[in-house]
Image (cartoon, rainbow, N blue to C red):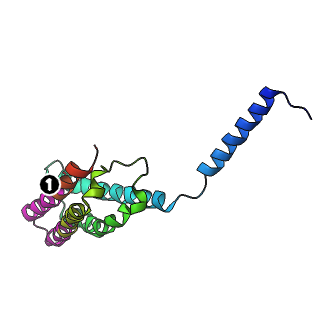
C-alpha cells in the first residue's frame, strides 16, 4: 500500500500521541507516589488545624472535645510528613517546595521536629481541656508551621 506523505505523518503523530497517553497513564513512579502522599498529609493537617484555629481566634466557641480531637489528629499526622520528602520527589513538578530545602535538609528536619514536638504537646494540653493553655499550645504549633513555610514553601 502506498501512503501519501500527509497520511503517513498523520499516522505517525497519532501513534506518538497514543503512546504518550499510555505512558502518562502508567503506574506512578516512587517519587510521584511520595509527593501525592505528602500533599495528602498536608491536606489532612490543614483540615484538622482549621477548626482549632477558628476556636483559638475566637471565631467559633471553644469546644474542648472537638479541639482535643483535632489536636490528636495533627499530632498523629505530623511525624508522617518527613517520609513524603523522599529524594525521588526532588525534581517533580506540582510542588510548592523551594529547592533550597534540599541544600538545608538538617535545618528543615529540625523545623519538622519542632512541629512534631509541639503538636505532641498540643495534643496533651488539649486533652486537659483548658482553653487558655490549649490556645497557647496551638499558637506554639502554628508558629512551627509558619517557620518552615516562610523558608521552604514557595507560596
Ligand atoms: C493553618 C494552616 C497553615 C498554618 C499556618 C500557621 O491553619 O493551613 O499552614 O495554620 O498558617 O501560621
Q: Quadrant of the C terminus?
A: top left
Q: Is residue 62 visible?
A: no
Q: Is residue 120 visible?
A: yes
Q: Is residue 97 left or right of residue 115?
A: right
Q: Is residue 140 magenta?
A: yes
99 or 29: nearer the viewer: 99
- Which image quarter: residue 110? bottom left
Q: Please provide percent x and percent y for residue 20.
A: 63, 45
Q: Is residue 72 left or right of residue 15?
A: left
Q: Is residue 10 magenta?
A: no
- How crowded pointer 1 is (Cα within 10 Å; few <14, some 14-19, many 20+) is rated as many
Respond yes or no on whether mark 1 lies under 8 Å from ligand 1: no
Q: Residue at x 11, y 59 (%)?
A: 135
Q: Is residue 108 above or below residue 20?
A: below
Q: Is residue 22 above or below residue 116?
A: above
Q: Residue at x 65, y 49 (%)?
A: 22
58 or 150: nearer the viewer: 150
Q: Residue at x 31, y 50 (%)?
A: 99
Query: Dot 1 corresponds to which residue?
Result: 56
Q: Please provide percent x and percent y for residue 13.
A: 70, 36
Count of labels shown? Answer: 1
Q: Is residue 81 above or below residue 20?
A: below
51 or 120: nearer the viewer: 120
- Which image quarter: residue 6? top right
Q: Quadrant of the N terminus?
A: top right
Q: Please provide percent x and percent y for residue 38.
A: 38, 59
> Could you tell me which secondary element the residue under label 1 belongs to?
helix
- Which image quarter: residue 62? bottom left
The span picked out in magenta is: 118-142
Q: Residue at x 29, y 69 (%)?
A: 79
Main secondary-structure element of the magenta-colored stretch: helix
Q: Please provide percent x and percent y for residue 95.
A: 38, 49
Amino acid at each position: 500500500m502506498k501512503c501519501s506523505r500527509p497520511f503517513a505523518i498523520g499516522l505517525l503523530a497519532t501513534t506518538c500521541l497514543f503512546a504518550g497517553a499510555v505512558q502518562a497513564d502508567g503506574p506512578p513512579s516512587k517519587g510521584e507516589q511520595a509527593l501525592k502522599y505528602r500533599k495528602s498529609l498536608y491536606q489532612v493537617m490543614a483540615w484538622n488545624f482549621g477548626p482549632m484555629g477558628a476556636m483559638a481566634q475566637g471565631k467559633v466557641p471553644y469546644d474542648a472535645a472537638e479541639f482535643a480531637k483535632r489536636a490528636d489528629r495533627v499530632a498523629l499526622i505530623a511525624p508522617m510528613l518527613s517520609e513524603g520528602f523522599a529524594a525521588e520527589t526532588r525534581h517533580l513538578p506540582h510542588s510548592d517546595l523551594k529547592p533550597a530545602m534540599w541544600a538545608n535538609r538538617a535545618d528543615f528536619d529540625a523545623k519538622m521536629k519542632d512541629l512534631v514536638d509541639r503538636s505532641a504537646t498540643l495534643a496533651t494540653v488539649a486533652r486537659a481541656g483548658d482553653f487558655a493553655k490549649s490556645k497557647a499550645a496551638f499558637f506554639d504549633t502554628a508558629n512551627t508551621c509558619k517557620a518552615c513555610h516562610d523558608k521552604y514553601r514557595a507560596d
